[in-house]
Image (tube, rainbow, N blue to C red):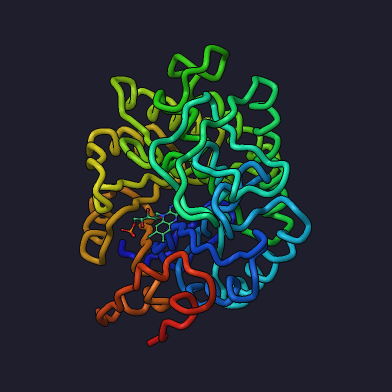
Amino acid sequence: MSLYTPFKLGRIELTNRIVMAPMTRSRSPGNIPTQSVATYYAQRADAGLIITEGTAPSPNGLGYSSIPGVFSPEQIKGWRLVTDAVHAKGGHLFIQVMHTGRVAHAQNLPKGARVVAPSAIAAPGQMFTAEGMLDHPVPAELTTAEVQATVAEFTHAARSAIEAGADGIELHGANGYLIEQFLNTASNQRTDQYGGSVANRIRFAVEVAEAVAKAIGGDRVGMRVSPYGLNGGMVSDPETDAVYTALAKELSRIGLAYIHVVDHAAMGAPPVPPAIKAELRASFAGAYILSGGYDLEKASADLAANKGDLVAFGRPFIANPDLVTKLKTGAPLAQADHTLFFSPGDKGYIDWPVG
Ligand SMILES: Cc1cc2nc3c(=O)[nH]c(=O)nc-3n(C[C@H](O)[C@H](O)[C@H](O)COP(=O)(O)O)c2cc1C
């Protein structure tokens, strides 16, 4: 078995085990994907599976400027350009549904939207806004009824993604955004059924997974998690392993297509202990996507050792639209210019040479 062995993921047949990792590129002015976004993903359609950039399920989830949403008719139309372009090249695509929660700023949100979170605790540090770098604000604590309304926002987004032609959705449970804000004590000090014990802290993630699985089929849903990650002020505590193991078991029961475990050691975070990675693999019946700092050698070794079924590559896809071919032939990889990761326009986005 190699990176080029096909894989059946839920309802779809992937031609290889190389996944394009979700990467925000901030090229959707007004939160609507453009023709350039369609071109960008179509250029990378050789990946067995593309997981798109983080995409908001509702106005409150649009914490960064120029990220797409997947809840309005205009956004669905924009995503249709993308899914048609990727499918025309034989590729497959899941839209990553990301609610930014407290990692947001009023400056970036559309009119009427609010910075919300499990508890009224600001994320540390600052974020980019039209007025430059500003402190993360203290978010409004969601009421119990609002938590349940937020679950419904995810359901609407999942339906919208399917209406737009996506093959499925990935729930962004990683990197310190809303779902992880519920899992983590740094951002969740609630006293209702969504805070406190392990069972309570995973409840929001489980309810979202259950609701979207009911709406579009669990075989079209995955979840990304980043245990031990530090993004957005997350902390680990003595219950971290118990939280993720319990969550993986619930997602398995619900019948999700995959769990996507990202280890941010390559980005400077403490490595995810191998024991918890193995525990998550054992606890979840569906596919397992490995992610974080992979190159050909490490990907091949981890697949051979059966640590996962699929391997996600992030940064290498930015400057190498033909990454799948380059890995196969051993061609050298181009290096991306990080100053163009989130810049507006096509430069550094769809102008990387193929072959
Ligand atoms: C420009 C950029 C944007 C990213 N945006 C997202 C995102 O929207 N959602 C997400 O889950 N991860 C995001 N990530 C993290 C990547 O998916 C991946 O986990 C990270 O780059 C490490 O993998 P790599 O070593 O293969 O690049 C982003 C990373 C980069 C470099």
| Residue 177 in view in this figure | yes
The image quadrant of residue 155 is: top right
**Location of the C terminus (image quadrant):** bottom left
**Most extreme residue toward the right, as rendered?**
73
Residue placed at 63% from the left, 48% from the top?
A: 109
Q: Nearer the viewer, residue 145 or 222?
A: 145
The quarter of the image that holds ligand 1 is bottom left
* Horizontal arrangement in the rendering, residue 151 relative to residue 64 (left or right): right
Residue placed at 37% from the left, 75% from the top?
A: 319
The image quadrant of residue 227 is: top left
Residue placed at 56% from the left, 74% from the top?
A: 90
* Horizontal arrangement in the rendering, residue 228 relative to residue 254 (left or right): left
Q: Position of residue 41 (x, y in %)?
A: 53, 71
* Horizontal arrangement in the rendering, residue 253 relative to residue 163 (left or right): left
126 shown above or below 123: below
**Most extreme residue toward the top, as rendered?**
191
245 shown above or below 316: above
Q: Nearer the viewer, residue 351 or 113?
A: 113
